[in-house]
Image (cartoon, rainbow, N blue to C red):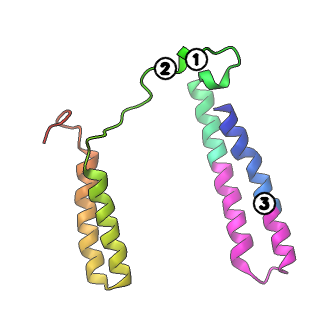
Amino acid sequence: MKIETKLFTYLTPFFFLVGTVYGVLVEWQEPVGFLALYLSGGLSGMIGFYLGFTGNRVGLRPEDRLDAEIHEGSGEQGHFSPWSWWPLALALAAATGFLGLAVGFWILYIGMGFAVIALVGWVFEYSRGDHAH
C-alpha cells in the first residue's frame, strides 16, 4: 500500500496550502471554501495514516514490489455476495428517508425502520450459511 499511502500523504499539505491561498484570496470572508479544503486535508491525512499503518502491519503486496510476478496477484481477492438483495433494500430505505426529509418527517421515520431491518439483514446474511433464507 505504499503508492496509496504516498498519494494521500502528499495530498494533505496540498489541501492545506490551497486552503490557505484560497482564504487569503477571499480575505477570509467566505468560510465554506477554505474550511472544506482544510477538512479535505485532514481527511486525506487520516486516510494516508491508516493506509500506512495497515501497510506496515500487513506487509508488501505484489503491486508494491518491483520483482513481483503476475501470478502472485491471482486468486481470491475477497468475499463478495453477488446474490444478495440486502443492498437494494438498504438503498430503497435510504431513498425513503431522504424523501422524508423533503416531504415530511413522518416518512423519514418509516425509512429509518426499513433501514434498520435492511442493515440487520445484510450484516447477519451469512450467519446461517450461503444461500440460507
**Does residue 30 belong to the magenta stretch?**
yes
Q: CA distance from mark 3 to mark 2?
A: 39 Å
Q: Circle 1 is placed at which residue position?
A: 70
Taking the image as shown, residue 95 lies to the left or right of residue 106, namely right
Between discs 1 and 3, the one toward the N terminus:
3
Specify the quadrant that holds the N terminus.
top right
Residue for badge 2: 74
In the image, the segment drawn in magenta is: 18-46
Residues marked 1 and 2 touching at CB (< 8 Å): yes
Pinpoint residue 82: horizontal percent, then vertical percent.
31, 40
Under circle 2, the secondary element is: loop
Q: What amino acid type should be assigned to the residue bearing mark 3?
A: Phe
Can you name the residue that lies furthest to the front here?
70
Which sits in the foreground, 13 or 3? 3
* Closer mark to the observer between disc 3 and disc 2: 2
Q: Residue at x 53, y 15 (%)?
A: 71
Give the residue at mark 3. 16
Provide the secondary structure element on which disc 1 rests: helix
Q: Residues within 10 Å of mark 1 (few under 14, many from 20)?
A: few
Which quadrant would residue 102 be assigned to in this image? bottom left
Q: Position of residue 96 (x, y in %)?
A: 30, 72
Disc 1 from disc 2: Cα separation: 7 Å
Residue appearing at x 27%, y 70% in the figure:
111
